[in-house]
Image (cartoon, helix red, strand yellow):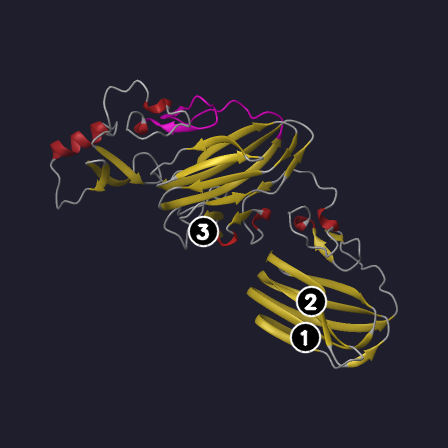
């Protein structure tokens, strides 16, 4: 048995093969992230080598398991090379065989799916995940266009970004903000983060629905700039930003048909923009209820905290949180906390809020601060 971790290569002897079936057995240990490829190197009559990827597998977060794969090889003067790139966990090869003739169907375990081309068995959880685990794409056929994405594996549910390098998986242990994901509520739970300050976009997998449905997701957005939701290049809504580390919920009722959803960031110095718990559900979104001490925006898709009513910053898409206000920004505010009553104290200085730095604060000042924050 040959165990691989990191980057590695295994070569077969060079030989002349007839039409053959190449079969490989392997074992995953730990949460395996990475990929393996079997590459044929065929020597033609002119002495040139043609390189072709015959079989491959990608692991996004594969637990302990025993697997088998195969492919049909048409023969020739060739040698095979196995390439591995394992970022975490380990992969062990149990056997590699070459037998004359056609490949027979694999004996797939009950909790797996056999690709139509009979090259591999994949886990049921890897079906309909917006990634071709099967070379022929059969694992993405006959899929319901719904998803429940918690971003707990490297595939990121097929979400992409433009530019392509702007989207990454992150989690609280590695990041100061958010310190916890939404779906699990732990420092080890994962979410996706946009890491570009220039104009960029998060692109959801294409959604095709035969009935009305609800798109529901959570986000954290702080810093400068604007964030907008588009559907088929038409603006649906603008999303407000908040200084607190609070996962904000948005739900949108969309009609049947084809939907190309994207979230576009532009115009500023981004501090945090993270997404988690993206779900599609059949039917209209339920009437949105806001948590205690939060008010609904008129669009019924978002809420804002009472501390940001009449604070001089537009938080609702239509700006109703700043309408009918008798005064401008409050003198004090809390930022970066995990709820409305925690965080770093900042004071208005000119047109922006700056951190309050002091060796001590009088009880009178504390009373004033608490009063402006709506606390007693």
Q: Earlier in the sequence, mark 2 or mark 3?
A: 2
Disc 3 marks which residue?
A: 171
Picture residue at 45% right of the left edge, 44% below the top: 274
Q: Nearer the viewer, residue 370 or 166?
A: 166
Give the distance between the C-alpha atoms of the residues marked 1 and 3, in whole angstroms: 35 Å
Per the rendered image, the range of residues in magenta is 282-306
Residue at image position (60%, 73%) is: 8
**Secondary structure state at the residue bearing disc 2:** strand
Is 318 in front, or is 368?
318
Residue 304 falls inside the magenta stretch = yes
Q: Secondary structure at mark 1?
A: loop
Q: Position of residue 355 (x, y in %)?
A: 22, 43
Q: Residues within 10 Å of mark 1 (few under 14, many from 20)?
A: few
Above or below — where is 180 with respect to 280? below
Magenta span dominant secondary structure:
loop
Quarter of the picture holding the N terminus: bottom right
Q: Residue furthest right?
A: 101
Q: Which residue is mark 1?
A: 1
Mark 2–mark 1 distance (CA, rounded to whole Å): 9 Å
Identify the disc placed on residue 26. Answer: 2
Q: Seen in the image, is 270 located left or right of residue 42? A: left
* Element under disc 3: strand
Q: Position of residue 217 (x, y in %)?
A: 51, 36
Q: Residue at x 88, y 69 (%)?
A: 101
Dot 2 crowding, Cα within 10 Å, few <14, some 14–19, many 20+: some
Q: Is residue 169 magenta?
A: no
Q: Going by the image, does 346 lie left or right of 237? A: left
Q: Earlier in the sequence, mark 1 or mark 3?
A: 1
Task: Choose mark 1 or mark 3, whichever is in front.
Answer: 3
Q: CA distance from mark 2 to mark 3?
A: 30 Å
């Amino acid at each position: 048995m040959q165990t691989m971790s990191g980057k590695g290569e295994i070569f077969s002897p060079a030989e002349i093969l007839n039409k053959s079936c190449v079969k490989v057995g392997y074992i995953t240990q730990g949460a395996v992230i990475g990929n393996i490829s079997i590459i044929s190197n065929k020597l033609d009559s002119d002495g040139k080598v043609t390189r072709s990827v015959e079989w491959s597998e990608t692991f996004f977060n594969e637990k302990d398991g025993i697997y088998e794969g195969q492919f049909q090889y048409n023969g020739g003067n060739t040698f095979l090379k196995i390439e591995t790139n394992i970022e975490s966990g380990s992969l062990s090869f149990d056997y590699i065989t070459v037998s004359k003739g056609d490949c027979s169907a694999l004996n797939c375990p009950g909790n797996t799916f056999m690709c139509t081309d009979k090259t591999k068995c994949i886990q049921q959880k890897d079906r309909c995940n917006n990634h071709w685990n099967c070379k022929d794409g059969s694992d993405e056929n006959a899929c319901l266009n719904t998803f429940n994405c918690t971003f707990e594996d490297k595939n990121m549910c097929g979400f992409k970004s433009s530019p392509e390098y702007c989207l990454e998986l992150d989690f609280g242990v590695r990041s100061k903000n958010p310190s916890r994901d939404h779906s699990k509520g732990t420092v080890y739970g994962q979410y996706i983060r946009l890491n570009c300050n220039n104009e960029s976009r998060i692109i959801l997998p294409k959604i095709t629905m035969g009935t009305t449905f609800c798109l529901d997701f959570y986000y954290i957005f702080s810093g400068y700039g604007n964030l907008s939701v588009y559907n088929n290049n038409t603006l649906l809504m603008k999303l407000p930003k908040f200084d607190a580390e609070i996962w904000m919920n948005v739900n949108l009722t969309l009609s049947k048909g084809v939907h190309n959803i994207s979230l576009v960031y532009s115009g500023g110095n981004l501090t945090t923009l993270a997404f988690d718990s993206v779900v599609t559900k059949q039917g209209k979104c339920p009437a949105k209820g806001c948590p205690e001490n939060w008010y609904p925006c008129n669009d019924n898709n978002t809420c804002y905290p009472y501390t940001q009513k009449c604070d001089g910053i537009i938080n609702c898409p239509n700006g109703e949180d700043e309408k009918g206000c008798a005064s401008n920004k409050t003198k004090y505010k809390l930022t970066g906390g995990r709820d409305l009553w925690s965080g770093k104290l900042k004071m208005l200085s000119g047109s922006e809020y700056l951190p309050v730095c002091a060796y001590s604060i009088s009880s009178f000042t504390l009373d004033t601060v608490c009063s402006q924050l709506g606390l007693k």
